[in-house]
């Protein structure tokens, strides 16, 4: 259970003990709280209580005890300026936020785009609400990719969600419009990806790269002014940088608008890529949640104006 009251804005978890003679340390580890988190809780302004009394991790628990972990307040990153602005939040609870990001907005600040990012706006929201937390981005999208993002409100939640994602527990489904018609309607791309020599941005398929897998399904074949296009669904089984964009270029079907990877900008001025579904198990409730986002206007127009 999560608790945050008006008197203590710190993030707090409570657990009921269901067996006798369990060390508090072992009990909390079984609940997914890492040794690093326990150390931070002890030395950085948090504490652990059992039945309302502060205890150390060597305390022996009994069935029926109520354990509360008061996580230390988090200091916002010095390099992340809180800002006010429009933020499309599809879902929010005490643990995380699901944001629907428009194309043209960065997820986090960079040298070229130090302000106006989703992270800046979320930091502004936290500051406005008096939430002692920093921004923990769980899933990230390229600046010109639209769709769903997950942001954790606490480092412990970030840790749990990141572990789930590494264990392939996330469903990340994208829709894209690619150039040309793939030969078959369903196929899998398993090609390792790595950085292109001499570039800090571009990725390529290379034998010594990291394993990457993308599952592809053609949803609709289109024609526009004599050009063949296809609306495809892509499910990520791994999460490498520019994975979809590089894999589709490797298949000779670059994303429309993706001039970095061989796509034409004649019809659309950004890569026609949208994160349409994001699903995972809420790490605190154990309930699987699936979030959906409709195609943005520019991609809908591409489809409606084709035959």
Image: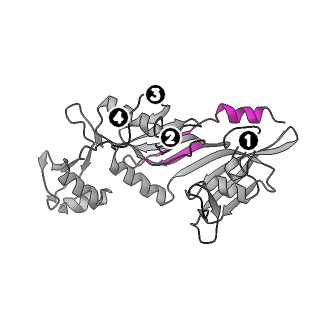
Asked whether residue 278 is drawn in magenta, I would say yes
C-alpha distance separating marks 1 and 2? 22 Å
Say which element carries label 3: loop
Residue 18 in view, yes or no: no
Say which element carries label 4: helix
Q: Please tell me which residue is depicted at 67% across the width and 58% down the height of the picture.
A: 247
Residue in front for this viewpoint, 246 or 235: 246
Q: Please tell me which residue is depicted at 28% across the width and 43% down the height of the picture.
A: 75
Whether tag 1 and tag 3 are in contact, CB under 8 A, the answer is no
**Marked residue nearer the N-terminal end (1 or 3):** 3
Where residue 118 sits: x, y (%)?
Answer: 47, 38
Say which element carries label 1: loop
Where residue 19 sits: x, y (%)?
Answer: 22, 58
The crowding category of the residue bearing disc 3, from other C-alpha atoms within 10 Å (few below 14, some 14 to 19, many at least 20), is few
Name the residue tied to disc 3. Answer: 85
**Marked residue nearer the N-terminal end (1 or 2):** 2
The mark found on residue 126 in the picture is 4
Q: Please tell me which residue is depicted at 18% across the width and 49% down the height of the picture.
A: 47
Residue 261 position (above or below residue 151):
below
**Marked residue nearer the N-terminal end (2 or 3):** 3
C-alpha distance separating marks 4 and 1? 38 Å
């Amino acid at each position: 259970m999560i608790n945050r009251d008006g008197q203590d804005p710190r993030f707090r978890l409570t657990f009921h003990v269901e067996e006798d003679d369990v060390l508090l340390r072992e009990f909390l580890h079984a609940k997914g709280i890492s040794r690093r988190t326990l150390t931070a809780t002890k030395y950085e302004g948090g504490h652990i209580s059992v039945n309302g009394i502060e205890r150390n991790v060597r305390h022996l628990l009994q069935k029926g005890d109520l354990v509360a972990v008061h996580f230390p307040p988090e200091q916002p990153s010095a390099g992340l300026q809180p800002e006010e602005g429009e933020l499309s939040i599809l879902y929010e609870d005490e643990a995380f936020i699901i944001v629907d990001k428009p194309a043209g907005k960065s997820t986090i600040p960079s040298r070229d785009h130090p302000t106006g990012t989703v992270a800046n706006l979320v930091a502004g929201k936290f500051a406005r609400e008096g939430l002692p937390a920093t921004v923990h981005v769980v899933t990230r999208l390229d600046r010109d990719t639209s769709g769903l993002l997950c942001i954790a409100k606490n480092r412990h939640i970030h840790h749990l969600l990141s572990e789930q994602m590494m264990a392939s527990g996330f469903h990340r489904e994208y829709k894209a419009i690619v150039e040309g018609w793939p030969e078959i309607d369903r196929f899998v791309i398993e090609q390792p990806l790595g950085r292109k020599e001499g570039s800090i941005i571009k990725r390529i398929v290379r034998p010594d790269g990291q394993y990457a897998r993308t599952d592809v399904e053609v949803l609709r074949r289109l024609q526009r002014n004599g050009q063949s296009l296809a609306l495809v669904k892509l499910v990520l089984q791994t999460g490498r940088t520019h994975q979809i964009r590089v894999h589709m270029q490797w298949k000779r079907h670059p994303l429309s608008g993706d001039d970095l990877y061989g796509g034409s900008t004649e019809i659309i001025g950004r890569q026609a890529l949208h994160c349409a579904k994001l699903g995972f198990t809420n790490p605190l409730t154990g309930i699987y949640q699936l979030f959906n986002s409709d195609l943005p206007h520019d991609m809908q127009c591409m489809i409606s104006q084709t035959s």
